[in-house]
Amino acid sequence: MAVVAQCSDGIAAFDLWAKHRPDVTLMDVSMPRIDGVETTRRLVVRHPGARVLMLTSSEEEQDAVDSMEAGAAGYIVKTVAFDDLLVAIREVHDGGRPMGETIARRLANRTPQGPISAREVNVLKGLRDGLSTQDIARRLFISERTARATVAAVKEKLGAATIGQAVARGYERGILEVRRTSATE
């Protein structure tokens, strides 16, 4: 890998991209004159083959969503280990869409109906554990009616017809983690 150019604002990024045509462009969300999201949007429209990896200090979900909608191929925070950054750059080069773990988990919890709330996650964990709505209500110190309504909300947000589907989608989206048990349990 070789760094072919470097700049600190979006306007300079256009000129340098046209001059050097890099295989992968690292872009920050926060830049003067034109921010990284708008720069990415314009760059990808003007040069459809441009591959942009957002490398930023922002861990805000909306920045990640805006970046990906603007045409970024990936979104990584600057705290990433150097070796992981190299892997992400190669992944973008090869057509992949790398995403930092924290941002990926947050985005996985977003649904068209909004993010999964803490209560909904706890209810989903109860469903994973095979609890009835009555047991979930006792565990969470809520009414059984609230537990039933929350189960319905979880199923709707995850696009699940059944409790089993909701639990499966919880695992798929990283909302639920596989629990490990020891050999002595």
Image (cartoon, grey):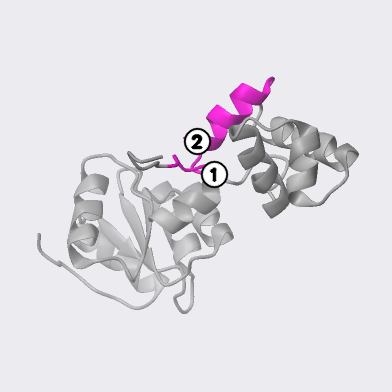
**Residue at label 1?**
175
Looking at numbered disc 2 in the image, what kind of residue is underneath it? Tyr
| 183 or 43, nearer to the observer | 183
Above or below, 12 relative to 67: below
- Which numbered marker is on residue 171? 2
The residue positioned farthest toward the top in the image shown: 161
Q: Is residue 50 above or below residue 173?
A: below
Start-end of magenta stretch: 161-179
As drawn, is 148 to the left or to the right of 77? right
Q: Residue 85 appears at what percent x and percent y? A: 24, 60
**Which residue occupies the foreground of this view, 81 or 16?**
81
Q: Are marks 1 and 2 in contact (CB under 8 Å)?
A: yes
Q: Quadrant of the N terminus?
A: bottom left
Quadrant in the picture for residue 151: top right
| Residue at the image position 65 percent from the left and 33 percent from the top | 127
Count up the numbered dots. Answer: 2
Q: Quadrant of residue 81?
A: bottom left
